[in-house]
Amino acid sequence: MANIILVGAQLGDEGKGKVIDVLTERADVVVRTQGGSNAGHTVFVGPQKYVLHLIPSGILRGKTQCVIGNGVVVDPVALVREIQDLERLGVRVNGNLRISEKAHMVLPYHRELDACAEKLKGKQSIGTTRRGIGPAYADKISRTGLRMLDLLRRDWPLRLREQVRASNRLLRALGGKPVSLAPIEAEYRRAARRLRPLIVDTVQLLHDALDEGKQMLFEGAQGSYLDIDHGTYPYVTSSNTTAGGACTGSGVPPNRIDKVIGVMKAYTTRVGGGPLPTEDATIADLLHGMGREFGATTGRARRCGWFDAVVTRQAARINGIDEIAVTNLDGLDTLSEIKVCTHYALAGRRLDRVPADLDQLAACKPVYRVFPGWSKDTSTARRWNDLPRNARAYLKALAQLSGAHLAMVSVGPARDQTILP
Ligand code: IMP
Ligand code: MG
């Protein structure tokens, strides 16, 4: 193993948490580099289920150094809550977690602004997780944000007051609910006391680790098509979820990265608004009926569709995906026929990429190749040859259509439900 970036190759919820948990066995350092508590990474260790939002999944290994990089937006109060929840389950956090002093903070007015913006958009709302992610990144780009280091400064109350004032002006103008300073100050002061020893110069920490030859895993959150630049704008999240974001979000340069792994589901899901060309009621009913595909952060039912190779092929290019991990194969076990979108048809012409213009994308008709199902439980398979022949053919086709090498298949949430072809 080397230094690896792991990204979602679709629209989030590809099963990254599980794949990261398997890979961290050999990683010394696991780094989150973008997003915030909008992410929800589900990991099972034995019967115990963990849902991580801000803390890298490596924390469950006990000895892995976990880093929340400068590109992440951190709600310190939510982070303390997450730490406490883990500690209650017996996970040691303190020694193993560090947070970038440069990471921007999410504050209660960001959540309020998020809700407000969604309401104003009405039918065109993005369906955000309402965690304040967009407004926090907006403050960062507008150069008015507060960073984790501000939480430790003596003049923190002053800086906070200024931002609360400015945000309240905006909230009032938008018809939102202004926030009050005093409780925020008290709550964040408490969080600061708890987090103080964990807030450091993580760029230095990561470069020291590189010098020592430590192996790093960059844990992507969300998916490539939620990327602020490359996703289905404006139905995206507010960070770079593609591989480049791992470098800017950590301070580790591109030439120290050895491999990019793309995680994709054996089908496609999307939570929130925006286009999903292969959306299909049959597969949605099937998966929801199995109790699958409900959001880890918001509990919302995810929209479901067939595997879209146009999306994964483009993701492979943008991210430089070397290897793919296909998850949730077992979700398709009972289907007699499985469709895969190989390309789109637009006004009678073949289209091999996702158009940036959403009206054009809406006019695209997915063109499907139909694969025979395998009608057999794959969740008990542990080796490549345990998989039914049709399942193997399906997986090979997904890799070939996506233009990357198949390196892992997941057939269930447990660590051992993992096949290395
Ligand atoms: P935000 O990141 O909360 O602003 O939400 C923007 C869009 O990204 C919405 O469609 C969300 O449902 C989606 N989104 C954000 N985080 C995740 C995630 O971790 N998994 C899947 N979708 C996400
Ligand atoms: Mg998720």
Image (tube, grey):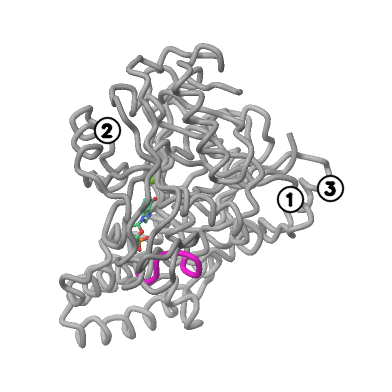
Give left or right: position of 123 versus 192: left
Marks 1 and 3, how far apart in space? Answer: 14 Å
Using the image, tell me which numbered label, if any, was put on residue 292. 2
Q: Quadrant of residue 82?
A: top left
Give me the residue at 16% from left, 73% from top: 122
Give me the residue at 21% from left, 75% from top: 121
Q: Which residues are magenta?
A: 228-234
User: Is there any visible trace of residue 205 in the rendered image?
Assistant: yes
Identify the amino acid type marked 2: Arg
Name the image quarter holding the C terminus: top right
Identify the amino acid type marked 3: Asp
Q: Residues within 10 Å of mark 1 (few under 14, many from 20)?
A: some
* Label located before the other in sequence (1 or 2): 1
Q: Is mark 1 within 8 Å of ligand 1?
A: no
User: Is residue 282 depicted above or below 105 in this figure?
Assistant: above
Kindly check if marks 1 and 3 are in contact, taking CB atoms under 8 A apart as contact: no
Q: Is mark 3 within 8 Å of ligand 1?
A: no
The nearer-to-camera label among 2 and 3 is 2
Q: Nearer the viewer, residue 297 or 19?
A: 19
Q: Nearer the viewer, residue 19 or 308?
A: 308
User: Is there any visible trace of residue 197 in the rendered image?
Assistant: no
